[in-house]
Amino acid sequence: MANEHVSSEMEYVGFWLRAWATAIDTFLILAVTFPLLVFIYGKSYVESSAIIKGPMDILISYVLPAIAILIFWKYRSATPGKMIFNAIIVDAKTGGKPSNVQLIIRYFAYFISMIPLFLGFFWIAFDKRKQAWHDKLAKTVVIRPRKRNPVARFK
């Protein structure tokens, strides 16, 4: 590993697993937020072409998911999507839990990763430590236990 603080028992999580984790998280967020928004705004929520339908739209669509994600990162070091793959977010230097400041930077740096056609996310595929731009800015990495060779157990 490029970092002596990340155990040899761990591996960096690559692009495709992180993409699946993001898809799972997105589905879970939509499963909670969309019914709430339709309940509040009725079917006009779906029919309206307005980007933001009102103050509850901002609260439910943006603030609530941000808080949920930050809480998951703080207390579980992962969102549910990452947990499915046994992936966790750690400090890139120490391999320990990231600070609250790192987690907040990481969250808002997602927008930097998104702006140029999601290039910051695709960067994971080419980076030796599988870091997206938001990971680099927050000084974090995403790791999981290294898969063991099942044949090696019988030697």
Image (tube, grey):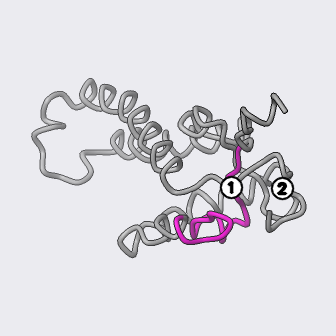
Mark 1: which amino acid? Tyr
Q: Quadrant of the N terminus?
A: bottom right
Q: Residue furthest left?
A: 47
Residue 94 placement, left or right of 71: right
How far from the left and from the top, in percent, is residue 47?
10, 40
Residue ID at (52%, 70%): 123
How far from the left and from the top, in percent, is residue 93?
84, 65
Q: Residue furthest bottom?
A: 116
Residue numbers of the magenta segment: 125-144
- Contact (Cβ within 8 Å) of mark 1 with mark 2: yes
Residue 108 placement, left or right of 73: left
**SS of the residue under disc 1:** strand
Relative to 151, residue 67 above or below: below
Residue 90 placement, left or right of 30: right
Q: Image quarter for residue 146? A: top right
How far from the left and from the top, in percent, is residue 36?
33, 27
Q: Image quarter for residue 60? A: top left
What residue is shown with label 2? 6
Residue ID at (18%, 37%): 45
Q: Quadrant of the C terminus?
A: top right
The earlier-in-sequence mark between 1 and 2 is 2
Q: Which mark is residue 12?
A: 1
Mark 2: which amino acid? Val
Compare residues 116 and 107 and report the one nearer the observer.
116
Residue ID at (36%, 39%): 56
**SS of the residue under disc 2:** loop
